[in-house]
């Protein structure tokens, strides 16, 4: 069986075994914005047994072929993130907006918490779409330039760590909004009188959260550190 070292950070565990991300999600263990904690530390904070969780993760890792994105160079990884996670968001955010509006209109009188769901999702979409555009139009082209450079490029923003820091702050706020959405929806629990659209909406929001966590992990914990290291390694 694949062994999961409970003393490794959550970020390292998911980078080595991306297939365990959903299992960590189900346990409420944040591997993206707070992935610098060890599995042991995170488990103890959540009142979980690290040995039991490590064994559960090892079982998941054993039954999956995993993914190869962790081995990509920075330019290819940026391409992968844009083609996978960005395209998912560009497609899903408008669809989820329509579903949120629909269930508020139909069920809002009996479920007043839906007004807060709508507000949180509206803010999240309003922040995520410009964020994606900035990465696609500014940061990712810089990363691709670095990937092919033999000397350190001169960027209008100075070092590439400057826009990266801004993106990471925006990631943190998106994570806070997603956490509030989960709390407001009672862990995306559909009420007994919820219709098909209600269920589709909550399932879609839960999937959005999971995909965004993996998306942020790939950037915060894999791509961005590699990009900064690459820039520093290039001669001026």
Image (spheres, grey):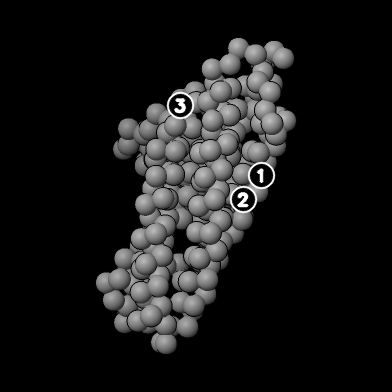
Q: Of residues 50 and 157, which is closer to you in this image?
A: 157
Name the residue that disc number 1 marks: 166
Measure the C-alpha gap from mark 1 to mark 3. Answer: 22 Å
> Which quadrant, please, contains the C terminus?
top right
Residue ranking furthest to the bottom: 109
Label 3 crowding class (10 Å Cα cut-off): few <14, some 14-19, many 20+? Answer: some
* The quadrant where residue 155 appears: top right
Q: Position of residue 109 (x, y in %)?
A: 42, 87
Name the residue that disc number 2 marks: 170
Q: Is residue 182 above or below residue 131?
A: below
Residue ranking furthest to the left: 196
> Which quadrant, please, contains the N terminus?
top left
Q: Is residue 150 above or below residue 142?
A: above
Label 1 crowding class (10 Å Cα cut-off): few <14, some 14-19, many 20+? Answer: few
Measure the C-alpha gap from mark 3 to mark 2. Answer: 23 Å
Q: Of residues 130 and 61, which is closer to you in this image?
A: 130
Q: Please indicate whether residue 210 sits to the left or right of residue 74 in the image.
A: left
Label 2 crowding class (10 Å Cα cut-off): few <14, some 14-19, many 20+? Answer: some
Q: Position of residue 180 (x, y in %)?
A: 55, 66
Q: Mark 2 and mark 1 in contact? Answer it, CB < 8 Å.
A: yes
Q: Identify the mark nearer the N-term, 3 or 2.
A: 3
The answer to whether residue 84 shows anywhere in this view is yes
Residue found 35% across the figure and 81% down from its top: 106
Q: Is residue 59 above or below residue 99?
A: above
Name the residue that disc number 3 marks: 76
What is the secondary structure assignment of the residue under circle 1? helix
What is the secondary structure assignment of the residue under circle 2? helix
């Amino acid at each position: 069986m694949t062994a999961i070292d409970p003393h490794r950070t959550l970020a390292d565990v998911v980078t080595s075994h991306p297939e365990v991300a959903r299992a960590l999600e189900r346990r409420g263990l944040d591997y993206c914005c707070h992935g610098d904690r060890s599995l042991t530390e995170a488990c103890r904070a959540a009142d979980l047994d690290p040995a039991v969780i490590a064994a559960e993760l090892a079982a998941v890792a054993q039954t999956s072929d995993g993914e190869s994105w962790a081995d990509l160079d920075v330019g290819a990884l940026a391409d992968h993130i844009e083609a996978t996670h960005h395209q998912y968001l560009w497609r899903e955010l408008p669809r989820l907006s329509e579903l949120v509006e629909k269930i508020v209109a139909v069920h809002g009188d009996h479920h007043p918490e839906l007004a807060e769901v709508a507000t949180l999702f509206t803010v999240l979409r309003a922040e995520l779409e410009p964020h994606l555009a900035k990465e696609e139009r500014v940061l990712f082209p810089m990363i691709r330039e670095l990937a092919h450079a033999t000397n350190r490029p001169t960027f209008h923003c100075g070092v590439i760590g400057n826009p990266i820091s801004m993106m990471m702050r925006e990631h943190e706020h998106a994570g806070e909004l997603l956490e509030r959405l989960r709390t407001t929806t009672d862990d995306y629990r559909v009420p007994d009188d919820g219709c098909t659209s209600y269920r589709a909406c909550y399932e879609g929001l839960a999937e959005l959260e999971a995909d965004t966590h993996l998306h942020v992990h790939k950037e915060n914990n894999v791509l961005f550190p590699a990009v900064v290291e690459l820039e520093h390694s290039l001669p001026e």
